[in-house]
Image (tube, helix red, strand yellow):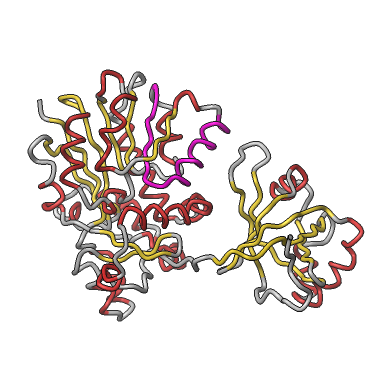
Amino acid sequence: MVEALTPDYKLQWDTFKIVTVGRNSGLPHIVRVRYVQVGSDLFALGGSVEADWVKNVRRNGQIRLRTETLAYAARAMVSHEDRDRVMDLFERKYGKGLVRQWYLGRSVCIRLVPVGAPEVMRQAKGEGDASKTFSEWRTEGRRYYGDVAMAFDSASEEYDVTIGRNFINALIRQRSLEVLYRLLRKDDVVLEIGAGTGAEAVQVARRVARVVATDISLAMVDLLRKKAAARKMSEKMDAVRVAAADIGEVRNMLPGGRVRVVYSFNGALNCEPRLAEFAAELASLVVPGGYFVCSIRNTLCLAEILTYAALLRYSGMVKRKVQPMMVSVGGADIPSTYYSVGRFLGFFRTDFEVESITGLPVILPPAYLNDYYVRARRVLRVLEGADKALGISFPLNRLGDQSLFVLRRKQ
């Protein structure tokens, strides 16, 4: 039996998210909308029939509604006959000024019928907003890889939106790729560790023969495959679910079982507890003279200390002192081990030598403090060029939120 929203149950939010399926890509498309509720039905207004999410609804009316803590499966359909009534209800709820600004003219009325019982969602938090301590997590007797995979599975649907709209994250990604691009050749088969939904893999695949992209999250891997298919790049991208320490399992997918370039960005290796095993497996896969380009989060971040000092929040200044520390991903708290530059390099010194170290960023704040920076960017944007220049200079290259390493396999 399908259980719809009952008329006496009122959603207690001013907006919610509608998740449609991209009509061409098959990927989740997320938009936050205002709504009104009439009995058991919900109504939203799209700004135009040309809006992507409205087109997706026309193609496939099976959608998801998401509040901060609940998710509903729902049916969605265009409802021209309800438009005038819904416009009146919108004016009562949100005010005539807002409605006239956003919804007059070509707006289209969408009727949303939730079906089934709601799914309880973990409330998404910022990466630095974990509420559980490592001791509390450990006493629960949880399985580490299972928790990490579950957290990133939960984050996968909104991962591209969350990362893509974060200015600091975008800046870190671009600078990391610039370093990687200088090492690539068109005939390379490249291996990625911790690919997520493939934001980097898609870019790299355009410059090489093929990318073998790995991640511990099955949901991330599934989205990466859909992304490759939507861009007609499936022949240039392979997506595999595997933990970093077990990376040797993909050997048969590499030409001759080895590669010239491996990369791992955005702290994926901070979530690998068997780093020594990973380093040994990596050495067996990289040809002599080949490269490993990776970034990890540091135990000492100068910009974080300065930011929290300015905010008069001492606890934030020392939050990386004890490792591992807890971070929030997909609404779940998971352990992540941050490293000093020296400790991290200690895992690789036997088989690799250091070519360069870059701080990412060094005077701009970490990505989880992005909102603070964006508010002041009009004044502080002059720091962005300086940050890039200072990031390659000792000792600041060791004091960023992340350190980006170029390691070369010994001959």
In the image, is 346 to the left or to the right of 186?
A: left
Nearest the viewer among 390 and 359 is 359
Answer with the quarter of the image where residue 226 lies: top right
Q: Position of residue 160 (x, y in %)?
A: 50, 49
Q: Position of residue 172 (x, y in %)?
A: 35, 49
* Residue at figure coordinates x 50%, y 27% from the top left: 234
Answer with the quarter of the image where residue 331 lies: bottom left
In this view, 136 is above or below 73: below
In the image, is 246 to the left or to the right of 98?
A: left
* Residue at figure coordinates x 53%, y 37% from the top left: 227
- Image quadrant containing the N terminus: bottom right
Nearest the viewer among 313 and 326 is 326
Chain part drawn in magenta: 209-231
* Residue at figure coordinates x 82%, y 58% from the top left: 109
In this view, 17 is above or below 408: below
Q: Position of residue 102 (x, y in %)?
A: 75, 63
In this view, 168 is above or below 14: above
Is 384 one of the magenta-colored residues?
Answer: no
